[in-house]
Image (spheres, rainbow, N blue to C red):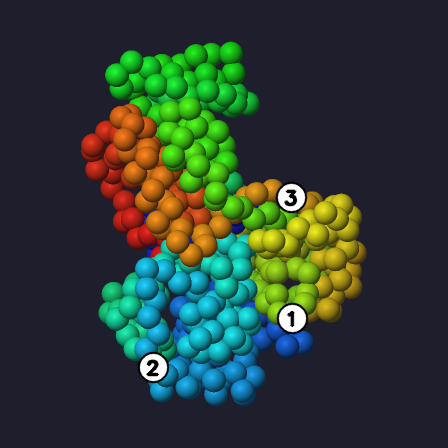
């Protein structure tokens, strides 16, 4: 099973196209179920439809999740004066001002938290939900803006699954890309830290990797922001300073396997958990129900996952693996009645795994690229810039290649949050 990312956004083409290019066409598989729940106000409730990252087009869209008071507050949006978004604004701050905090706390927060492990009241709307930012600039009412997004999506007649997985796990993708790259003549050095990156001559570069010194016409730095800062500091101190300021969130995934005969789970792919409800886990995925290949591989075993950890929430991650398994089992019991003892458990810690996109993130990225752009033969890409999802990071890589070669790389480049 995947112990990290488990699916790829299919409405953006980059990830699925890359998987096809490296020979995984026959393994592409959509989720067996797209039905999810939200564990809030003491019960598992169906995940609402008719919203954009938790922001509804009508109050009725969130019926059953919000209180009557929260639903009435949404209806006031149409009568409120216009709220300017300016150059950027925090998603939570803007949505709460228009629709009330309950929308943010019970739906926007768990949905955004599932992507960024961040705080909705800090996350940039321009960087994380750009379509909502653009719509808010041209509409007086936020619910009207959401309905406009939904109408454009309907007119585009997008069909097919929203997400796609890979039989055997999304972890197959980087392995297949590496194999394809080697077949085309690439050399990949693993277990070989790069300790130095220096300009060489008028436009070349010298890289020290392990005990080797490599000369290159062009270099793409595709590592997390703190590591990129260290490598770029000698030649691009301005970019390094900006990269050093990028913050990261840590999280852990707890994977549990049960005898199928011992448990009975609710239908669907799992559930999200709003932080406002005071639970420890932030989500659970019923992996064997979500992915047919997991169920087919061993019909007698049922696999599920929980996740813990958000930006600024470090205490829970200080627990040992047994402690994280125990708290996951406690919350699963509260949510679903699951009492059985797992056959096996695995805790996977993603320390500083998710870059944060606070208000003004787009401006920081522009400054980084401005500094890097002054040096010939150098580009940067990765999750710290234009989106943390798999398609977004692939598009980021294509843009970096295009900068170095001048040759356009086919990509849809939809931007973060698309």
The reply to whether residue 51 is in sight is yes
Residue 294, given in percent of the width and then of the height, sits at 58, 50
Q: Is residue 288 above or below residue 44?
A: above
Q: Which part of the image, by quadrant, shows the C terminus?
A: bottom left
Residue at 23%, 29% (x, y): give it.
405
Q: CA distance from mark 1 to mark 2?
A: 31 Å
Q: Residue at x 44, y 75 (%)?
A: 97
Choose the circle earlier in sequence order: 2 or 3: 2
Q: Can you say whether 359 is above or below 364 in the image?
A: below
* Numbered disc in front, either 1 or 3: 1
Residue 241 located left or right of residue 110: left
Q: Which residue is mark 1?
A: 277
Which image quadrant for residue 331?
Answer: bottom right
In the picture, residue 320 is in which quadrant?
A: top right
**N-term mark: 1 or 3:** 1
Q: Element type at marker 3?
A: strand
Q: What distance separates the C-alpha of mark 2 from that of mark 3?
A: 47 Å
* Residue that numbered label 2 is attached to: 81
Q: Nearer the viewer, mark 1 or mark 2?
A: 2
Which mark, residue 348?
3
* Crowdedness near tag 1: few (<14), some (14–19) or many (≥20) residues, C-alpha within 10 Å: few
The answer to whether any part of residue 301 appears in the image is no
């Amino acid at each position: 099973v995947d112990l990290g990312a488990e699916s790829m956004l299919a409405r953006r083409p980059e990830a699925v196209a890359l998987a096809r290019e490296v020979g995984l066409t026959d393994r592409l598989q959509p989720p067996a179920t797209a039905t999810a729940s939200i564990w809030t106000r003491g019960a598992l409730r169906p995940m609402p439809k008719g919203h954009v990252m938790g922001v509804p087009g009508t109050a009725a869209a969130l019926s059953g999740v919000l209180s009557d008071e929260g639903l009435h507050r949404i209806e006031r949006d149409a009568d409120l004066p216009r709220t300017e978004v300016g150059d950027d604004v925090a998603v939570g701050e803007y949505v709460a001002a228009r629709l009330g905090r309950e929308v943010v706390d019970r739906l926007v927060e768990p949905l955004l938290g599932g992507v960024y492990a961040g705080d909705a009241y800090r996350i940039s709307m321009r960087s994380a939900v750009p379509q909502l930012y653009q719509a808010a600039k041209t509409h007086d009412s936020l619910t009207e803006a959401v309905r406009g997004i939904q109408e454009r999506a309907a007119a585009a007649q997008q069909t097919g699954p929203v997400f796609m997985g890979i039989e055997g796990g999304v972890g197959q993708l980087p392995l297949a890309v590496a194999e394809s790259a080697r077949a085309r003549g690439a050399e990949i050095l693993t277990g070989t830290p790069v300790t130095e990156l220096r300009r060489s001559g008028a436009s070349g570069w010298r890289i020290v990797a392990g005990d080797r010194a490599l000369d290159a016409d062009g270099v793409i730095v595709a590592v997390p922001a703190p590591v990129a800062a260290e490598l770029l500091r000698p030649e691009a101190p301005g970019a390094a300073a900006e990269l050093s300021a990028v913050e990261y969130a840590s999280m852990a995934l707890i994977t549990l396997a049960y005898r199928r005969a011992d448990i009975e789970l609710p239908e669907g792919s799992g559930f999200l958990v709003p932080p406002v409800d005071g639970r420890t886990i932030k989500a659970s995925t019923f992996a064997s129900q979500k992915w047919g290949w997991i169920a087919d591989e061993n019909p007698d075993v049922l696999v599920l996952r929980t996740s813990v950890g958000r930006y600024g929430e470090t205490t829970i991650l200080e627990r040992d693996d047994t402690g994280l398994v125990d708290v996951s089992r406690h919350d699963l019991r509260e949510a679903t009645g699951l009492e059985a003892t797992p056959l096996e458990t695995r805790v996977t810690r993603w320390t500083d795994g998710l870059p944060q996109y606070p208000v003004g993130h787009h401006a920081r990225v522009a400054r980084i690229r401005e500094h890097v752009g002054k040096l010939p033969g150098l580009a940067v890409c990765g999750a710290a810039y234009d989106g943390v999802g798999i398609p977004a990071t692939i598009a980021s890589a294509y843009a970096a290649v295009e900068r170095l070669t001048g040759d356009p790389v086919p990509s849809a480049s939809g931007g973060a949050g698309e």
